[in-house]
Image (cartoon, grey):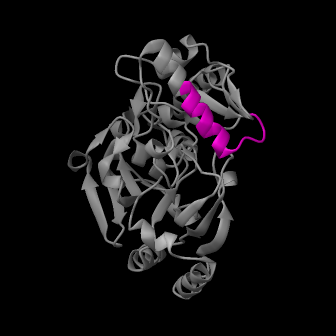
Amino acid sequence: MNTAGSALSGAEAMGAPAWEDFTAALRLQLATKTKLQREEPLAPKTTMRVGGAARLYAEPASATDLQTVLRAARASGVEVFLLGRGSNVIVPDEGVEGIVISLAHEAWATFEVVAGGAVHVGAGLRLKNLCGRAAAAGVAGFEFLEGIPGSVGGALRMNAGAMGGWIFDVVEAVELMTFDGDVKILAKAEMHVDYRHCAELHHAIAIGARLRPATVANADSIKRQMDAYAQKRHETQPREPSAGCIFKNPPGHSAGRLVDESGLKGERVGDAEVSPVHANFIVNRGHATAAEVIELVRQVRARVRQAKGVELEPEVLLYGKNWKDVL
């Protein structure tokens, strides 16, 4: 989740000694429960399992520590990047020149049914856990999110959806923190949301949300619906490591169908492969590199353009970079 928070020149100008000094100074301001790590590998933190390290990686244990990290980055001209469950990103092989922030600490994984039947959740809560806890509480309306391998924060940033539903269908309000460290609560009506996009979260971090489900239902019936969605995903989506759907659906078209009809299922560059199960997935067959994935994206776009006259645009994020610079 690239956020382009501050000038690139700050991060680019920092060599290893400067990063060490910056890290040491920042660590003195943070609680011991907050993780702060230099050159943290990012590939294991993504579902595609490719890419290099973050120059600095932080898992704040509180809103205060998140605020401290953001303000230190802004003051030093260091770029900030967000990482949720890593399900919609490709990390470049060279890693990321900046601070990668993840709300992976348990403090951000809250779930509470509040007055009036709404649910308040922390941005670090896994979507799978949101659905499970809602089902246990007899709260229906979130089942379509169960199979998305992400967190609430990442889903809000990308307006994630599946099975005909979108997370903003059930959002009442979002609590966010700006890159200046200020906390705001925005009602859904105040936010600019469309396909795979939430404008307000390009320069801010979602830290929580108030969700209102469709209805209250029996826990068993909710579980049955979740199982039906899970079965459908199992039958139609690959099991190998991937970043989810690679391309956005062009207006009036299915990206997967266009790739399939262009004869590209099974196409490979190294260990990166267009899935034989679903053509809008590129999977990692074992030891793929980010460079192989990017090259395969290039080849698929070129073939679809030639065969169908349609220019596919990536849906997955190229972490720390812009697709237009590499395609």
Q: How many marks?
A: 0
Instruction: Determine which quarter of the picture holds residue 192.
Output: top left
Residue 212 visible within the image: no
- Write down the region rendered in magenta: 285-300
Q: Is residue 15 above or below residue 236?
A: below
Residue at the image point whose x is 34% and y is 46% from the top: 198
Which residue lies at the image location 57% right of the left edge and 69% below the top edge?
58
Residue 14 vs 273, above or below: the answer is below
* 291 within the magenta span: yes
Q: Is residue 296 visible?
A: yes
Judged by its main secondary structure, the magenta piece is helix
Using the image as rendered, state which of residue 21 and residue 204 is in the foreground.
21
Residue 263 location, quadrant: top right
State the residue in front, 78 or 88.
Answer: 78
Left or right, residue 188 beside residue 86: left
User: Where in the figure is residue 162, as x and y percent of width and height?
Assistant: 47, 30
Q: Is residue 273 above or below residue 61?
A: above
Q: Residue at x 52, y 40 (%)?
A: 131
- At a point 46% along the width and 20% down the height, the residue shown is 305
Rendering coords of residue 292 (x, y %): 67, 39
Question: Can you give x and y, in whole percent of width and height, for residue 277 in the image?
Answer: 66, 20
Among the 4 quarters of the image, the one containing residue 244: top right
Residue 327 or residue 55, whichever sits in front? 327
Q: Residue 9: x and y, percent?
A: 43, 70
Can residue 7 be found in the magenta stretch? no
